[in-house]
């Protein structure tokens, strides 16, 4: 299999507005060590809660409350809110690309809980 098209796609993604916006905001936000640590904790908690939902386990209400509080704190900062939204837009674009590729191959990719 020839991979040149995949490398071109990678280059195209790096030139996309979604990527450039995300990368610029990431450098700004993650340069602040306190914000970076809070964002890492936010992501850890988000994955934990999502995994619980996908596996049918109950999330500890205290953890849910901590996640809600941390989310409110982070999204109250405009630069963090913009960064997290840019990250979500880039993730959505990559998910769309993955869907196109899997449909083209006829491959069925199923995530837990689907």
Image: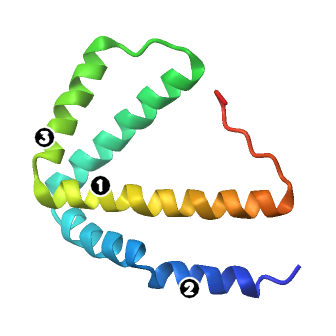
Position above or below: 51 against 19: above
The circle drawn on residue 73 is 3
For disc 1, the marked residue is 84
Q: Residue at x 51, y 63 (%)?
A: 93
Q: Position of residue 109 (x, y in %)?
A: 75, 45
Q: Residue at x 49, y 57 (%)?
A: 92
Q: Marks 3/1: CA distance?
A: 13 Å
Task: Describe the element under mark 2 as helix, strand or loop.
Answer: helix
Q: Is mark 2 in CB contact (under 8 Å) with mark 1?
A: no
For disc 2, the marked residue is 11
Pick out the residue farthest to the right.
1
Mark nearer the N terminus (3 vs 1): 3
Label 1 crowd (10 A; few <14 / some 14-19 / many >=20): some
Q: Position of residue 32 (x, y in %)?
A: 15, 62
Is 30 on the left-hand or right-hand side of 73? Answer: right
Q: Marks 3/2: CA distance?
A: 35 Å
């Amino acid at each position: 299999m020839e991979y040149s098209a995949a490398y071109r796609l990678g280059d195209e993604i790096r030139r996309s507005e979604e990527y450039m916006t995300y990368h610029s905001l990431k450098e700004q936000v993650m340069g602040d060590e306190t914000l970076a640590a809070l964002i890492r904790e936010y992501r850890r908690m988000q994955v934990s809660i999502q995994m619980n939902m996908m596996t049918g386990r109950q999330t500890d209400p205290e953890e849910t409350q901590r996640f809600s509080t941390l989310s409110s704190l982070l999204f109250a900062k405009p630069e963090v809110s913009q960064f997290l939204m840019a990250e979500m837009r880039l993730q959505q674009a990559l998910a769309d690309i993955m869907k196109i590729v899997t449909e083209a191959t006829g491959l069925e990719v199923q995530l837990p809980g689907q």
